[in-house]
Image (cartoon, grey):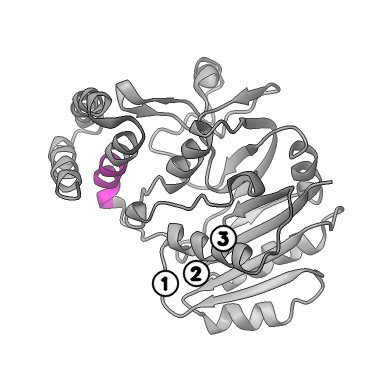
Amino acid sequence: MNKLIICIPTYNRPEQIGSIFQMLENQKNKNFSLIILNDGASTETKKIIENKKTIEYFYYLESEKPSGLPLARNKILDFIENNKIYDDNTFIAFLDDDLIIESDFTEKILFYSQKYDGFCFRIIQNGDATTFDFSKNLFLQKILSPVIGKIFPFLGMYFGGFYIKTSSIKKVDHLNGGCLIYNFSKNKNNRFDLNLNEGNFVAEDTCFSYGLKLRNNDLRFIGSYSFIHNPPNSGGCKIEDNGERFFWYWKHKLYLIGKYHGTVILSSAIFFCILESIILSIFFRTNLIKKNIRALKTYKKQL
């Protein structure tokens, strides 16, 4: 059987980390290790975790200053590699600290790890799921089902849709970050890109998992099994700045496409991103074209 390491970076969410720890304690299959990074070294989080000792293979890490999500995840990956707590068949599951999972969660991970290099489960979202929330429109979900987890670099587009329920297992180009599971042993040198370690809409999960796909990893979306994403009003490893969400969205999308596909496809993506900003400006009745242009200028300065 494959080895499973569950990794959770957390920032200022003691109640949530205590809750998910308890859910992991209650798993039917306890054949896993757990690593929690207390990002920012919250004393409340530390007190909660100090009383949790029932998981046999549990590692507690601290970072004095908040890291941002990509760096926090890299610190965990470096710890795993440096301390050699993996073998030839080790899978890592990066979880957000605010998830609600069922008692068969690790059982499902270990089952699908026998079949695929990487995968994710369906998100049931409490609160805002996405810029366009189609989770209650069955007709749109059916239409969008074929493009779940797909990336179209030439068009400057990537689509999540990981809230869509489907009985089939979809082959995808990237995975969702709330529950990102992959074969660490096959990809132990891969790290999250720190050029995306800023902003509210960082797309670090898209960038990382798309890199796995381009390295011939078989990635899948398991839409028949789900978890609940239940974010509180504060905390988490991302900087919340909803007023700038489209700026980060375009900046990081251009970076992702340029990183993996070069200038020719990037030029095409820029054109379609500008077109997208015009359409969204009409839809939201606000000027998003300025944010698109600023994102492009900021991206160019980093080249």
Task: Tell me if 287 is positioned left or right of 134 in this view.
Answer: left
Inter-mark Cα distance, 1 to 2: 7 Å
Label 3: few (<14), some (14–19) or many (≥20) C-alpha neighbours in 10 Å: many
The one of 115 and 177 positioned closer to us in this rendering: 115
Q: Residue furthest right?
A: 28
Callout 3–callout 1 Cβ contact below 8 Å: no
The one of 154 and 158 positioned closer to us in this rendering: 154
Inter-mark Cα distance, 2 to 3: 17 Å
Query: Where residue 77 is drawn, which disc sits there?
Result: 3
- Marks 3, 1: nearer the viewer: 3
**Residue located at (18% from left, 38% from top):** 292
- Marks 1, 2: nearer the viewer: 1
Residue at mark 2: 11
Mark 2 or mark 3, which has the lower sequence index? 2
Q: Position of residue 47 (x, y in %)?
A: 64, 83
**Residue located at (31% from left, 27% from top):** 156
Magenta part of the chain: 243-252
